[in-house]
Image (cartoon, grey):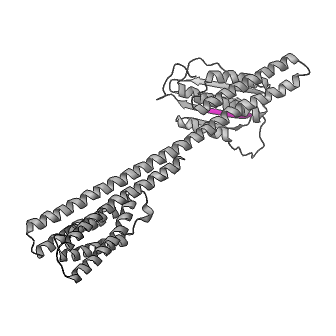
Amino acid sequence: MADRIESLWIRLRQRVWRGLGLVWLLLLVFEAAAYYGHPHPFQDRLLVAATVLVFVAVDVWFITRAVSASLEAPRIRPRSHQALAAILVMVGLSFVLVSFDGADFAAAFYFPVIGAAFAFRSWRGWSLIPLVSLAIFIAALAGGTPWYYAALYSGGMLFTGLFMVGIAALIRSNRQLQAAREEVARLAVSDERLRFARDLHDLLGHSLSVMVLKAELAHRLAGQSPELAAQQAADIERVGRQALREVREAVEGYRQPSLEQELVNAKSGLKAAGVSLTGPSLSDPLPAVLDSTLAWALREGVTNVLRHSHATAAVLRLEHAPEEAILELTDDGCAHEPGFEFKQGHGLHGLRERVEARQGHLQAGPTPDGFRLFVRLPLKQAPVAASAA
């Protein structure tokens, strides 16, 4: 709907500007009417009528395309040689009309001058404006017009042409600015889609992995220990509700995970999978943006442990130095065969984008003893918040 309205608005503006350009033809009509208001030979009247008709036809073709080129439709912009030919034809026809009655048809020269201002986009084409003005000045002097009248008329022609050059440049600049705004809006939508896709993967990938593991554990415990199975079922409900809340917040764009909460989730999820986690607790609060980035890193690392490693133990290292923050998560998962080629999935790819956005460094890959995820974030220029939530 918005695209249709924009298209209608563009077409309306084109028609308005074309109409304004064609309104000036009324000036030529009035000049012709003034000419026919005086007695002239029949052959002169016939020749003037034919000249005016040809002039109007060329001007209608030329002005509409020149104006459209400066507004919304560069595809119909006349080529340089076509524009030059049209201008020369109108200049020649103007001299023909002036030869019959200079007083009545003097304004005809304004049409090619204004057309040149809109048709060309460099001084090479705009140089026609002073050349036409100079030709008019010389022709007026040759016809016996006093030099001051000739200078006044040709000077007004030159000023009008240069003024219309500025108007045409302003119109084109506004169009380019509008196109730039549309491109910025399109890129913003694209970035938001990437952000949401990345967040959705990180949110649901981790939560669903934990829920699957707890569901398997509850299934195994159902016949042996109903109480423990019920506890796992309650954990599944809690994780599911938390995931639902986080997805809603992600849609709204307000969700920022905290490292403290992810530490709790990591211990719970790994414990349910039978993986022991050794690591420190969070002592000092981090700047909000770094806290959320490290929280995403820990979530992705734990998800990889739960999904792929078949590990029995994991070690977490957190360091908060004056200039940087470090998170390292290693596990003792299955070693890979020699020659194994590690490929990052969507989760690690999205995490790398988050880390690089904070001018940080990420390393992730298999080791002889398992798998290692390492994230380093600089603390400089990071806004400090009282709470990382």
Q: Is residue 115 magenta?
A: no
The C terminus - image quarter: top right
Which of 19 and 358 lies nearest the eye of the viewer?
19
Query: Is residue 152 something one can see in this rendering?
Result: yes
Identify which residue is drawn at 42% across, 49% down: 178
Q: Quadrant of residue 131?
A: bottom left
Q: Which residues are magenta?
A: 369-375
Q: Quadrant of residue 354?
A: top right
Question: Please, which residue is most extreme toward the right here?
Answer: 223
Query: Is residue 71 something one can see in this rendering?
Result: no
Residue 180's place in the image compared with 302, above or below, is: below
Q: Position of residue 145 (x, y in %)?
A: 10, 71
The answer to whether residue 30 is left or right of residue 64 is left
The answer to whether residue 215 is left or right of residue 316 is right
Q: Position of residue 332 (x, y in %)?
A: 75, 31
Identify which residue is drawn at 65% across, 28% down: 246
Residue 268's place in the image compared with 121, above or below, is: above
Predominant secondary structure in magenta? strand
Identify which residue is drawn at 67% across, 41% down: 346
Q: Position of residue 94 (x, y in %)?
A: 24, 73
Identify which residue is drawn at 33% across, 58% down: 20
